[in-house]
Image: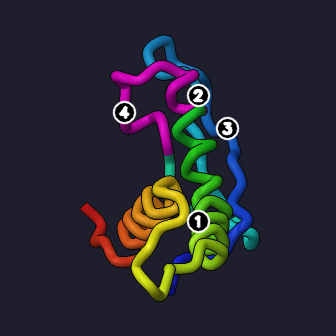
Amino acid sequence: MAHTPGPWTIQAIGQPTPRCGFAYMIRDNRNCALAEVGHTDAITDGLEAEDNARLIAAAPELLEALETILGEIHDDPFGFEDDLSCAIIRHAARTAIAKATEGSAS
């Protein structure tokens, strides 16, 4: 996997505007800019831009958590599920991990 390792942080940038509040820069642990949220999307309000920035900044930790969860929920070698919720969690984790690691930027 070649994504920038975490932790990622959020920095408010610029002056707030009436339509979209502050913009936010997502930065890596070397203080390099990874993404900007807010200025380019004037239809969102400031609170939505901040929430989006928090979600993006949490991406490395969320991916690590999903990989850990998936590693702890083992496949039943006999094909019997003790708990259907394990199968659902396993599927959801695999789907999200694939989206984060195999998808192309669009």
The residue lying at 69 percent from left, 60 percent from top is 8
Question: Is 39 a magenta residue?
Answer: yes
Magenta part of the protein: which range? 37-50
Toward the left, the furthest residue is 106
In what element is the residue under mark 2?
A: strand
Please tell me which residue is depicted at 55% across the width and 51% down the height of the picture.
56
Crowd rating for badge 2 (residues with CA inside 10 Å; few <14, some 14–19, many 20+):
many
Give the spatial CA distance, label 4 vs label 1: 29 Å
* Residue picked out by circle 3: 12
The residue carrying pointer 3 sits among few (fewer than 14), some (14 to 19) or many (20 or more) residues within 10 Å by Cα, namely some
Q: Amino acid at mark 2?
A: Phe
Where's residue 67, x and y in %? Answer: 59, 73
Q: Circle 4 is placed at which residue position?
A: 41
- Disc 4 or 1, which lies upstream in sequence? 4
Residue that mark 1 sits on: 66
Marked residue nearer the N-terminal end (3 or 2)? 3
Contact between marks 4 and 1 (CB within 8 A): the answer is: no
